[in-house]
Amino acid sequence: WHQLDELEKSAAPVIMTERGVYAGETVIGVSAGFLAAKTMIERTATSDATLLFMGETGVGKEVLAKLAHRLSSRKAKPFVALNCAAIPEGLIEAELFGVAKGAYTGAVVARPGRFELANGGTLFLDEIATLSPLAQTKILRAIQEGEFERVGDTRTTKVEVRLIAASNVELTEAVRAGTFRADLFYRISTLPVRVPPLRQRREDIPVLLEHFRRHDRTVPGFAARAINALLVYDFPGNVRELERMVERAVLLADDGRAIDLRHLFLETDNLELNPVMGLTSDGRIAAADTADDRDDLVRQMLDLIVDGGGSLQEMEQMVIREALEASGGNVARAARTLGLTRRQLALRLEKMQPNGQAL
């Protein structure tokens, strides 16, 4: 009982009501995949049919579940969320269905579970595939019959809830493997909604960047190369990872200066060692240090000179400016990046100044 009490204190249910709740739950996206999921929710807004959101961790399944609740006729009633994977197996039944007075030593009062808290509203069960077979059986009965017993009680409690479930694993495979009940799967998959990962809806990245840049700092925006890097990054953590990256970058960026690569990808210390960076297949930033990478870079610069009417001097100045920007204006660091001494770089900077003065 003490363990259950501590768990409830640290993982209190998320309960949403209509007034003043959704200010931080804006649903944002312009990609075809995201709009398809959103359209499915809007078309079934008046229905009490069970929704099943499928998609990788961090794609925004709970945000969409809250949208479904907000658009439904139950919007004035509670929205209760539970991450099934966060509850120990021995306590999941008590979390879902509550505890009767005297069920455990120290259970001096009865406690409602998530089904009771969501009565009349919406119950969102995230990572439902992690539930034990016994918990799956009891959930199936609760949603089919609309009733259950609290732990340690013989009386039946009746509830009326709309269930929304989510899974980051393929439930059809879990059914075939025997780890998920087929009858429960068919019961909760009335309206399956697949939420694509962020790497498959890159059109959403620019609008999400502006949405997440919300801290009270004077950061005007993002450097072009930072946006370009984010547009090709694979985001294994999906939207949640992007949000954390932007939150961190806003805190690290200087007031009045744009967010750059070094603010977004802290784990890549070699950013200041080589201004020509690329992204590896697993999403890490790395120097373009292979022969093929260097050959491609040389060809690109040559094309700029021949086709664009530029000059070798302009290419050199472009590289110097990039190195200075990457080093935050630190001339000595930029010089090391370029393989020059500080004096050599200072002489080049003098020539770049229209009035002949060094930086």
Image (cartoon, helix red, strand yellow):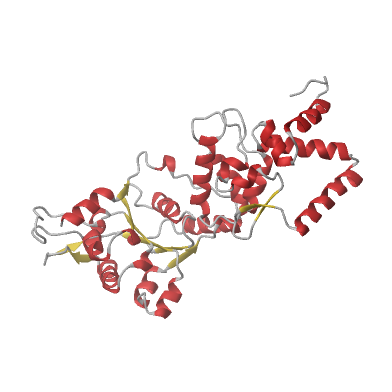
* 150 left or right, relative to 161: left
How many numbered callouts?
Answer: 0
Q: Nearer the viewer, residue 182 or 122?
A: 182
Residue 168 or residue 182, whichever sits in front: 168
Q: Is residue 60 found left or right of 91 in the rendered image?
A: right
Dividing the picture into quadrants, the one containing residue 2 is bottom left
Percent position of residue 239, x then y = 51, 51
Give coordinates of residue 277: x percent, y percent: 69, 49
Indicate the position of residue 190 as horizontal and vertical percent values.
42, 68
Residue 212 seen in render: no
Q: Quadrant of the C terminus?
A: top right
Quick check: 301 above or below 88? above
Residue 283 seen by the camera: yes
Measuring from the top left, give residue 118's x and y in whole percent: 28, 54
Left-right relation of 267 to 180: right
Residue plotted at (83% across, 40% down): 315
Query: Which residue shows up at 72% across the image and 36% down it?
Result: 335
Name the residue located 30 percent from the left edge and 74 percent from the top edge: 133
Above/below status of 224 relative to 217: below
Q: Nearer the viewer, residue 222 or 173?
A: 222
Instruction: Say which of 75 and 202 sits in front.
Output: 202
Q: Is 332 placed above or below 15 here?
A: above
Q: Is residue 17 above or below residue 296?
A: above
Q: Quadrant of residue 290?
A: bottom right
